[in-house]
Image (tube, rainbow, N blue to C red):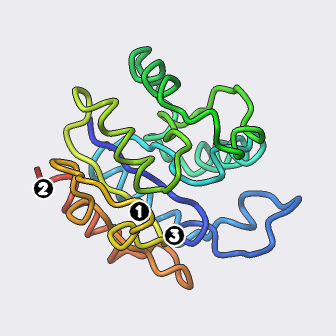
Amino acid sequence: MKVVFLDIDGVLCLSRRKRNMKASSVIDSGCLNSLKLIINSTKALIVLSSSWRMFKESVQMLEELFKIEEIYGFYQSPSSSSSSSLNENTNSDNSNNEQEEDFNIGFYDKTPILSTRRQEIIQYIKNNQNDINNWVALDDIDLVEDIKNIYDLGPYEIKNHFVKVDASIGLTEEDAYKAIEILNFLK
């Protein structure tokens, strides 16, 4: 399977004010169309890597919008082996876990909560390496320069699978074509 690791803030959501707002008012429609282009062109599944994954209401808001917009790569159920390996590797000492509820998300899956986004993505790939054929990370955080915890990434080198999104404009059509090229042609 192909996987898109999706951040929300700075990729789809350009608004700083999100409280008590509907998804359609905080998610940029142009950015959403670029994501739809990626999913339709690659048949990839979406794994939430965003901090939004920790809040049930935020995930539900996204699910509703994605259904309306007919973005189909997000609501397939993960295999039981994927879910169990993900849950086993979630860091229970992380203070963010207190905010995370035990709920099923409509997205294919979500990354575990670790020290850095890069670690979360790499751990997810390691946990699901038999299922993932190719992947791309869409994020406004520079995952290549993330040096908070340097370790050997081996075959999971992130720089060849990463599209850095400009947070001031969000996911563009140009970004989408880069992601499509990675998912369809890079092995």
Q: Which residue is mark 1?
A: 138
Viewer-side residue, 132 vs 70: 132
- Dividing the picture into quadrants, the one containing residue 150 is bottom left
Question: In the image, is 85 to the left or to the right of 95?
Answer: left
Q: Earlier in the sequence, mark 1 or mark 2?
A: 1
Element type at mark 2: loop
The quadrant of the picture occupied by the N terminus is top left
Q: Which residue is mark 2?
A: 186
Q: Residue at x 51, y 39 (%)?
A: 112
Which residue is outermost to the top?
80
Q: How far across and how far down the image is residue 72, in percent? A: 46, 40
Residue 80 to residue 132: above or below = above
Q: How far across and how far down the image is residue 39, in percent? A: 37, 50
Which residue is outermost to the bottom?
168
Q: Residue at x 32, y 69 (%)?
A: 144
Q: Which residue is mark 3?
A: 31
Q: How far across and how far down the image is residue 71, in percent? A: 49, 47
Residue 18 to residue 86: above or below = below
Query: Which callout, 1 or 3, points to the residue nearer the camera?
Result: 1
Q: Earlier in the sequence, mark 1 or mark 3?
A: 3
Assess disc 1: are there few (<14), some (14-19) or many (≥20) residues with their C-alpha within 10 Å of its C-alpha.
many
Assess disc 2: are there few (<14), some (14-19) or many (≥20) residues with their C-alpha within 10 Å of its C-alpha.
some
Element type at mark 3: helix
